[in-house]
Image: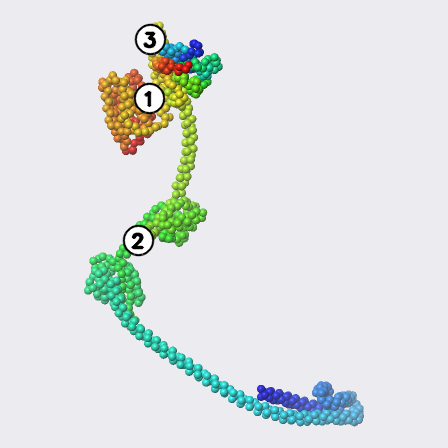
């Protein structure tokens, strides 16, 4: 993809099928530029907090929005969210949860942790594309990061 | 005193004189004996001499007998004489005699011896020699000397005796004179004494007689006073008797009869109660008012009693003229004439009809009560206000095996458990003192010796003043109840444990189910998304190269995948219903229905749908779930009326079995009631998916929600004639 310092959207997704469909949907919505993909929670956290193989990255160059799948290997979406929202440097980054379920408990837990939006990945691909487009656009274009960057 | 000494001296002198006289007489007697004995001795010697001479002359042995008698007895005669003379002066003459006698006897013996030898010459020589004669002379001289001496002594003694007698005479005369004087003086003294005593006695007797006389006159006066008082009393008493009779007539029923039983007198009250006139009664006997109630024996006893002169008391039932009965407490008294024969009977009676009726009522009531108490299965008893139990029912005796005597009063303690007894006594005593109900459970020993537990209640029966009149108690056997209670407790404990176990199991199962549904929600949907998503990508990116049938197939794949997605969603929400907690609150049903219709409205805006909403009462339930019910039912109604030109949907409520019942009636395709039981089953559909889309889960969700609210849902329909779905939200009353 592109320079790690110019990433505008971080997509955290472990399922290759879902990842491909999501990227397709993002591309359709013209949001495919400056996307970084993390395949699990650990990688996502390393990217955000400029650790491990992302140590050279500037933490201040955080993505404009993070699309975070709930079910992830190693560290799950809730743990990632918790860490993000618990850190003053990263808590202002908008996070949109991507999940297969409408489980009440999941919803409650993520909202309590300060999630900004929620997308239930529908079986129907058109509806998924639509949801991604709407939310991605909303958070990336309308909800600009603070000018302090 | 001088006289006494004088008399004593006289007596002593007399005694002395008497003793001297006695001695003198004794001495004289001895002297005479001595003289006789001396004579006898001489005579014996002469006999011996004569015998010996006779033998010598004749030679005949018979002449020897006197000699032999003297020879053998002379020793004793001499010894006696010697003993008698031992103290007297004559004994020297006796001592001189001894050799002389021996010599004489010896000479006689030699003569006899010679004769025996027939030596006559020797005999003649010996006799003729004169030796014998000389010896005999000496002996005679000695004996005469002795006799003379003894006679002299005797004479002296006689003279002394004479003087002694004279002295005695003087003494006796003097003593007698003195005694006479003494007696005279004594007689004089005694006479003086006696006179004095007599005088005193006469004086005393006179005084006594005076006292008696006084007392008698006092008694006489007293008797007189008493008599006067009696007389007064009698007068008063006579008047009192009159008063008494008047009072008696006021109070009592009085009758008199002659000895034969004929009525001779009745008072007004007798007439009043018997309802006969006096004229009707007089002269009759008592049979006129006989009720026939009493036995013949009873009446006979009555007459026997009074006829024998004793008083009879008792209660009699009589019959009045009008046939009504009345009870009398009667006392019949017989009265006698001077000859002791019965003159008349008087009977005094009191009306006790009311009391008898009350008694009969009480008796009946008690009888009924006891019958009841005996027929009940509990033990029962009655106690006095002080707690003394005087009656137990039969069950008590059957159970305890005791007798009434053993149980009376506080005897019940013997069938109690000694451990529990003190508390029972304390509680019972407290109840008696306070007059409040007694209730307690305790064991009682049965006839078989085993204890059973009884719940005992004692209720005080109080009179109008609030005082306890009686205690009525029951003992209910609660042993089986207690056992059942214990069993229930055990079962409950067991049940609780099982509930706990089951809850744990259920929680585990629930957790597993949650994990399962979570995994269904995420993992089952994921491949479906891929199927749908990639099919879509193919259709989008390769539509130019993919022939039309290929594109149609892909579209079918996508529909199936999406249907399955819907199914999973529905299933999840159905599962969620079971776990979700109900948050019941009052809900404005009317408003809820309107909101639902607004939400559902747009998809069917191209059709003509007529919806009428009737009165809908407030419903109590979980708002979100109730909304789901209305959504599902109304969307069904809209769905199945799709083919009607004008869809008609009626929403309303009614009362069924006392609870609010909501209904949704449509004019849609309806269904065959034969399949009504499948209507609310999961994945059950009565229409093909081609005619009406759906997963067959909507009504299952409705049913689950309604059931969770405690209500009921049902449907009535006919093919092509519409359907009516009804539901309640609470348990109906059984009609």
Residue name at image x 32 percent, y 26 percent? B623
Is residue A97 placed above or below B145 in the rendered structure? above
Q: Nearer the viewer, residue B112 or A14?
A: A14
Distance of label 2 from label 3 (alpha carbons):
110 Å
Identify the image quadrant of residue B123: bottom right
Mark 2 lies on a secondary structure that is helix
Instruction: Indicate the chain on which mark 3 is placed.
Output: B
Q: Nearer the viewer, residue A47 or B715?
A: A47
- Please tell me the numbered disc located at residue B549: 3
Mark 1 lies on a secondary structure that is loop
Residue name at image x 31 percent, y 19 percent? B694
> Residue under circle 2?
B363
- Percent x, y of residue B676: 29, 24
- Percent x, y of residue A74: 46, 18
Estimate how packed mark 2 is, as few (under 14), some (14 to 19) or many (20 or more) residues with alpha carbons within 10 Å: few
Please state, as top left, top right, bottom left or bottom right, where the C terminus of chain B lies in the image: top left
- Please tell me the numbered disc located at residue B697: 1
Can you see residue B731?
yes
Q: Give the mark toward the camera: 1 or 2.
A: 1
Identify the image quadrant of residue B587: top left
Is residue A117 placed above or below B79 in the rendered structure? above
Mark 3 lies on a secondary structure that is helix
Q: Is residue B74 left or right of residue B1?
A: right
- Percent x, y of residue B525: 38, 17
Estimate how packed mark 1 is, as few (under 14), some (14 to 19) or many (20 or more) residues with alpha carbons within 10 Å: many
The disc, 1 or 3, on the residue closer to the chain's N-terminal end is 3
Residue name at image x 27 percent, y 26 percent? B590
- Percent x, y of residue B135: 77, 92
Can you see residue B672?
no
């Amino acid at each position: 993809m592109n320079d790690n310092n110019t990433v505008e959207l971080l997509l955290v997704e472990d399922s290759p099928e879902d990842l491909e469909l999501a990227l397709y949907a993002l591309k359709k919505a013209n949001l495919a530029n400056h996307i970084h993909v993390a395949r699990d929670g650990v990688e996502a956290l390393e990217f955000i907090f400029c650790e491990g193989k992302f140590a050279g990255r500037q933490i201040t160059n955080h993505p404009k929005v993070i699309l975070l799948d709930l079910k992830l290997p190693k560290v799950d979406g809730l743990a990632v969210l918790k860490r993000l929202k618990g850190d003053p440097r990263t808590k202002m980054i908008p996070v949109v949860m991507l999940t297969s379920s409408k489980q009440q408990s999941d919803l409650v837990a993520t909202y309590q942790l300060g999630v900004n939006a929620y997308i239930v990945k529908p079986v129907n691909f058109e509806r998924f594309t639509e949801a991604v487009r709407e939310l991605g656009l909303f958070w990336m274009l309308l909800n600009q990061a603070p000018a302090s960057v | 005193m001088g006289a006494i000494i004088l008399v004593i001296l006289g007596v002593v002198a007399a005694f002395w004189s008497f003793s001297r006289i006695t001695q003198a007489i004794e001495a004289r007697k001895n002297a005479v004996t001595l003289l006789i004995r001396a004579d006898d001795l001489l005579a014996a010697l002469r006999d011996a001499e004569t015998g010996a001479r006779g033998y010598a002359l004749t030679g005949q042995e018979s002449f020897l007998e006197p000699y032999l008698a003297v020879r053998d007895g002379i020793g004793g005669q001499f010894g006696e004489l010697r003993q008698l003379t031992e103290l007297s002066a004559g004994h020297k003459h006796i001592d001189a005699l001894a050799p002389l006698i021996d010599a004489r006897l010896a000479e006689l013996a030699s003569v006899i011896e010679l004769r025996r030898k027939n030596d006559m010459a020797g005999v003649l020589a010996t006799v003729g020699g004169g030796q014998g004669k000389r010896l005999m002379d000496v002996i005679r001289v000695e004996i005469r000397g002795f006799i003379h001496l003894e006679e002299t002594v005797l004479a002296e003694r006689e003279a002394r005796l004479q003087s002694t007698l004279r002295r005695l005479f003087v003494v006796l005369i003097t003593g007698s004179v003195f005694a006479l004087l003494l007696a005279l003086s004594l007689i004089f003294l005694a006479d003086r004494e006696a006179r004095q005593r007599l005088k005193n006695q006469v004086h005393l007797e006179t005084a006594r007689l005076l006292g008696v006389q006084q007392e008698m006159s006092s008694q006489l006066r007293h008797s007189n006073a008493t008599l006067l008082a009696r007389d007064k009393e009698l007068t008063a008493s006579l008047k009192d008797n009159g008063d008494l009779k008047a009072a008696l007539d006021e109070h009592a029923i009085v009758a008199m009869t002659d000895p034969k039983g004929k009525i001779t007198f009745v008072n007004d009250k007798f007439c009043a109660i018997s309802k006969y006139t006096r004229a009707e009664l007089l002269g009759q006997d008592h049979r006129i008012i006989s009720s026939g109630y009493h036995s013949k024996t009873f009446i006979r006893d009555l007459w026997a009693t009074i006829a024998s002169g004793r008083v009879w008391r008792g209660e009699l039932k009589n019959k009045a003229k009008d046939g009504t009965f009345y009870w009398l407490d009667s006392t019949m008294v017989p009265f006698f004439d001077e000859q002791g024969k019965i003159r008349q009977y008087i009977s005094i009676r009191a009306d006790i009809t009311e009391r008898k009726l009350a008694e009969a009522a009480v008796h009946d009531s008690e009888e009924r009560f006891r019958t009841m108490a005996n027929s009940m299965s509990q033990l029962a008893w009655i106690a006095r206000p002080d707690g003394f139990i005087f009656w137990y029912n039969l069950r008590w005796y059957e159970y305890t095996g005791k007798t009434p005597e053993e149980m009376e009063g506080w005897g019940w303690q013997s069938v109690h458990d000694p451990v529990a007894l003190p508390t029972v006594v304390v509680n019972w005593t407290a109840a008696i003192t306070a007059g409040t109900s007694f209730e307690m459970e305790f064991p009682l020993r049965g006839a078989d010796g085993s204890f059973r537990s009884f719940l005992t209640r004692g209720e005080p029966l109080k009179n109008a003043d609030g005082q306890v009149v009686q205690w009525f108690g029951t003992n209910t056997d609660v042993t089986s109840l207690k056992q059942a209670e214990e069993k229930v407790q055990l079962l409950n404990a067991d049940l609780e444990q099982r509930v706990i176990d089951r809850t744990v199991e259920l929680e585990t199962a629930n957790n597993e189910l949650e994990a399962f549904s979570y995994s269904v929600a995420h993992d089952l949907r994921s491949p479906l998304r891929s199927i749908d998503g990639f099919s879509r990508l193919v259709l989008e990116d390769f539509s130019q190269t993919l022939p039309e049938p290929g594109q149609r197939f892909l579209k079918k794949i996508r529909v199936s995948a999406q249907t399955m997605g819907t199914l999973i969603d529905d299933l999840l929400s159905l599962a969620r219903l079971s776990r979700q907690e109900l948050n019941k609150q009052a809900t404005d049903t009317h408003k809820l229905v309107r909101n639902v219709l607004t939400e559902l409205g747009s998809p069917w805006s191209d059709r003509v749908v007529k919806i009428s909403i009737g009165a809908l009462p407030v419903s109590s339930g979980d708002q979100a779930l109730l909304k789901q019910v209305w959504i599902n039912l109304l969307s069904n109604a809209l769905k199945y009326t799709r083919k009607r030109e004008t869809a008609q949907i009626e929403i309303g409520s009614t009362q069924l079995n006392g609870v609010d019942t909501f209904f949704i009636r449509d004019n849609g395709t309806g269904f065959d009631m034969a399949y009504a039981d499948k209507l609310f089953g999961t994945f059950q559909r009565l229409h093909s998916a081609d005619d009406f889309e759906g997963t067959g889960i909507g009504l299952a969700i409705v049913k689950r929600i309604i059931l969770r609210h405690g209500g009921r849902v049902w449907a009535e329909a006919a093919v092509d004639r519409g359907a009516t779905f009804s539901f309640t939200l609470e348990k109906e009353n059984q009609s």
